[in-house]
Image (spheres, helix red, strand yellow):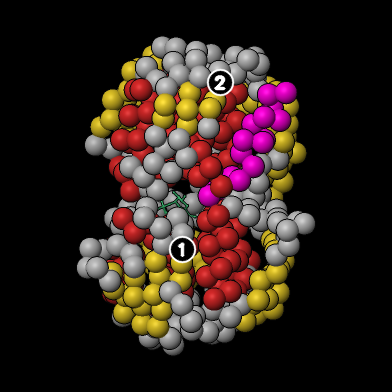
Amino acid sequence: MKIDPAEKPLNGELEVPGDKSISHRAVMFGSIASGDTEITHFLPGADCLSTISCFREMGIDIETSDADPGHVIVHGKGLHGLSAPDAVLDCGNSGTTMRLVSGILTGQDFSTELTGDDSIRKRPMKRIIDPLTAMGASIRSRSGNGCAPLEIDGRPLRGIAYETPVASAQVKSCILLAGLYADGPTTVTEPSLSRNHTELMLKNFGADLTAEGTSVTVRPDPKLEGTKIKVPGDISSAACFIAGASVIPGSHVILRNTGTNPTRDGILRVLQDMGGTVMYRNLNTSGGESTADLEIWHMPLHGTVIEGDLIPTLIDELPLIAVMACAAEGETIIRDAAELKVKESNRIDLMVRGLSAMGADITGTDDGMIIRGGRKLHGATIDTAKDHRAAMAFTVAALAADGPSEIRDADCVRISYPGFYDDLASLMK
Ligand code: S3P
């Protein structure tokens, strides 16, 4: 897709689509609860559609409609209501689908196989295979390289206490979901707190779960009951316009009903550390998830250091933050973010390559990036490796450049934000 430099500031207001992490979980937990779960503002992105198709394969009736793709009704069949799928489960590009569904499948009384696209078949699954195996699960990487396809033979599980080496909500959630099928309590302790949507939502479905600090314990065999879930706007999608407004002078945007869960709001904290401002209006909470209308103005930014416990709260926004850092005066250091190397692509290499091609002064490190900002970017042809977050970040960078850019495979934005280019255009009228 060709992106020209922005001729006008970003201006206006919109509500971004529903949160991807929360949309996945609403379908998963609704499927293993008894009765109906009605989801509104669901994200009809390709990743969440992969989750819907996996549960349909396992006998769950999930109503969707083209007329209102954000409205989904899951007719749950209870904790033990899934049935063996006829085919291999296809998780597409979605790490959340593969890792969380694996946790559920290890406790069933049938066997399954999970696979997905080229990207997901390269991503590390040993991080879930190890703890699930410690619970007594039978889960194998078919090619023996610690990656998908995964073969799972459901069987009785035992509760464990597990310390995860990485702060990963996918790993934490996988173990907690397996814990629902175990013979005793299961505790997961993380090095830093990752997004806590599983904890909040499972509790609302009726799970017996306690969270304290970076530890969470779930007790087995709860009675999960269907519920109503209103999905907040995805802060990871809103981040495109937060970054856009930060790098395009004169911009002013309002992002209605955006999720502001403190385990996800790191980009707002970084924006303020860099000299930007954000106003929170219409604060609300639904199902334990906080939301607000976020009002952002363009402000000149300066460099900062992003590290430690902050990293899990903005891990998916780091490509956009790298773009903001290119526009900021001075040096920005991102460290403790080695996880970026095992996302949909190696996001350190990819962002360094793409932003360097646009003239940025950026160096990749083993666990992050160092960016010396303040240089005007120029247009370039950019490889996105079909990584949705990188495609959106490079699009924002291209808007701030001084000549046209070509963003390759830009349609990969359909993974998390199918209407991204339309929404962007609506702010540039
Ligand atoms: C997600 C957790 C994060 C995030 C991903 C979605 C989730 O991954 O990067 O986009 O829904 O739990 P990790 O858990 O691997 O950090």
**Rendered location of residue 332, percent (x, y):** 37, 23
Q: Residues within 10 Å of mark 1 (few under 14, many from 20)?
A: many
Residue 350 percent coordinates (x, y):
35, 35
Instruction: Determine if the C-beta at disc 2 is less than 8 A from ligand 1.
Output: no
Q: In this view of the protein, which residue sits in the foreground, 115 or 246? A: 115
Quadrant occupied by the C terminus: top right
Q: Is residue 27 left or right of residue 177?
A: right
> Is 52 included in the stretch rendered in magenta?
no
Task: Name the residue located 69 percent from the left edge and 27 percent from the top edge.
Answer: 427
In this rendering, does residue 391 appear at all? Answer: yes
The reply to whether residue 393 is in sight is no
Number of the label disc, if any, that sits on residue 91: 1
Residue drawn at x 42%, y 37% is: 384
**Disc 2: which residue:** 4
Q: Nearer the viewer, residue 338 or 424?
A: 424
Measured from the top left, where is residue 298 in percent x and y?
A: 60, 18
Q: What amino acid type is highlighted by mark number 2?
A: Asp
What residue sits 37% from the left and 19% below the top? 360
Looking at the picture, which amino acid does disc 1 mark? Answer: Cys
Give the residues drawn in magenta, as a range.
415-429
Image height of 102 relative to 352, above or below = below
- Which picture quadrant has residue 328? top left
Q: How many marks?
A: 2
Judge from the rendering whether residue 316 lies leftward or rightward of residue 62; answer left or right: left
Residue name at image x 53 percent, y 14 percent = 300
The image position of residue 263, as x and y in percent, is 51, 46
State yes or no: discs 2 and 1 in contact (Cβ < 8 Å). Answer: no
Q: How far apart are labels 2 and 1 at the CA level?
A: 34 Å
Q: Is residue 157 above or below residue 6?
A: below
Q: Which mark is residue 365?
A: none
